[in-house]
Image (cartoon, rainbow, N blue to C red):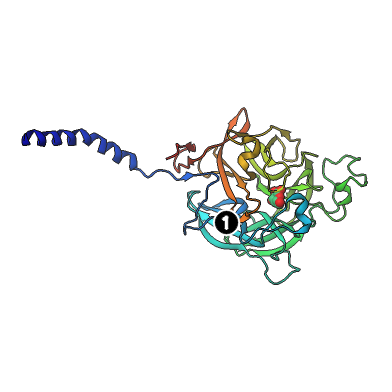
Amino acid sequence: MHRRFISLIAATLFALVPLIGACQAAVSPQPSPTIRPGERWLDTSGLFINAHGGGVLFHQGTYYWYGELKEGTTYITAANKSWGGTRVVNGGIACYTSTNLHDWKNTGLALPPSKHDPDSDLHCEKVMERPKVIYNAKTGKFVMWFHQDTADYSAARSGVAMSDTPTGPFKYLGSFRPNAGIWPVNASSRDKQPNADNKLAQDFEGGQMARDMTLFVDDDGKAYQFYASEGNPTMHVSLLTDDYLRPAGKYARICVGRSMEAPAVFKRNGKYYLIASGCTGWLPNEARSAVADDIFGPWTELGNPCRGENADKTFNGQSTFVLRVAGQPDTYIAMFDQWKQWDLRDSRYIWLPIRFDNGAPIVEWKANWSLSSNKSSLTASKAP
Ligand code: GAL
């Protein structure tokens, strides 16, 4: 009896050996980091990543994620009540660094707000949104552009700052309305006629309104600002000077009357792509996409790029940037913000891979997916 028991245990252990081996094979090598869209994303010190409306710069092997720091209580001012424009005190522009796009280290404020000067563009009662940073290879400077505004969003200006290092602190250079005294390259004679409804003509002298914005650097080093203008219905594409600090004086109206916000621009196989939102404040709407052979247009709309659960509401998010993954051919990540209108500091991030269907960008919902650092594609993974 005793001997039979021992041999039973031995047989059981023997049967388990291949399973133990399989488990070891499953845990090594290290699983690639998992992105969980819409869930809390912690930085390397265990705190919630706070970089909203952001963009990512890749420079010398490191990714830099810049975004709006949203802290404190969410409130609404009388001027913004009609459209639900809640806000928090302006916290300035945060910066995080990473080498694997998953583990982000907080490097502090790249551009702090001004706490004591109410006349400053950077004052905490003002608006600093959608910061984007690009590197100028000619000057060796890092240049930041962002949407600068008064609390009621009536100023509609672009703020510019510059730094010798990517983490800053950036030196604030000032704000302006772009392209004062210049007509767009594709303006018709009708577009130039001043009348009560023609915001382009009304703003000709003082400069065009610029709210939601992004920057894009082309292969030839030329940089462009895309901004929602003319009260938001029409987007402008505006060439920057060689130092990236001002508009160069050449711009075009695109997606005229389509009320596109939250622009995210990228290039693939010689074509320019735009992913944007509609115009409903913090509330989600259906995303749009467009393609062009020439950055100044014409741009052809391709429809909603989102697929899957809540695709008609951009997965309850709003576009902010498209990130090209370094060293991985044809690999792009669409970045969205999932705003919490009444608790803005708890707003989340939705990062999803982009695939292409007949040249159109498609962003499919995934509850989680992994970033594999050494493969040419990003792989979707099953929930653990
Ligand atoms: C959104 C815009 C955000 C922010 C918000 C304010 O439409 O994309 O960047 O300005 O409105 O409610």
Q: Which part of the image, by quadrant, shows the N terminus?
A: top left
Q: Count of labels shown?
A: 1
Disc 1 residue type?
Asn
- Visible in this render: residue 243? no
Residue at 72% over, 33% down: 301
- Ligand 1 within 8 Å of disc 1? The answer is no
In the picture provided, is 310 more to the left or to the right than 158?
left
Residue at 68% over, 37% down: 286
Q: Which part of the image, by quadrant, shows the C terminus?
A: top left
290 shown above or below 177:
above
Instruction: Answer with the quarter of the image where residue 245 lies.
Output: bottom right
Secondary element at tag 1: loop
Instruction: Answer with the quarter of the image where residue 331 lies.
Output: top right
73 shown above or below 28:
below
| Residue most extreme to the bottom | 116
Give x and y (percent) for residue 343. Answer: 62, 54
In the picture provided, is 275 more to the left or to the right than 380?
right
220 shown above or below 168:
above
In the picture provided, is 34 more to the left or to the right than 245?
left
What residue sits right under mark 1 in the picture?
50
- Visible in this render: residue 318? yes
Give x and y (percent) for residue 7. Answer: 10, 34
Give x and y (percent) for residue 84. Answer: 73, 51
Instruction: Answer with the quarter of the image where residue 191 lies.
Output: top right
Give x and y (percent) for residue 135. Answer: 62, 54
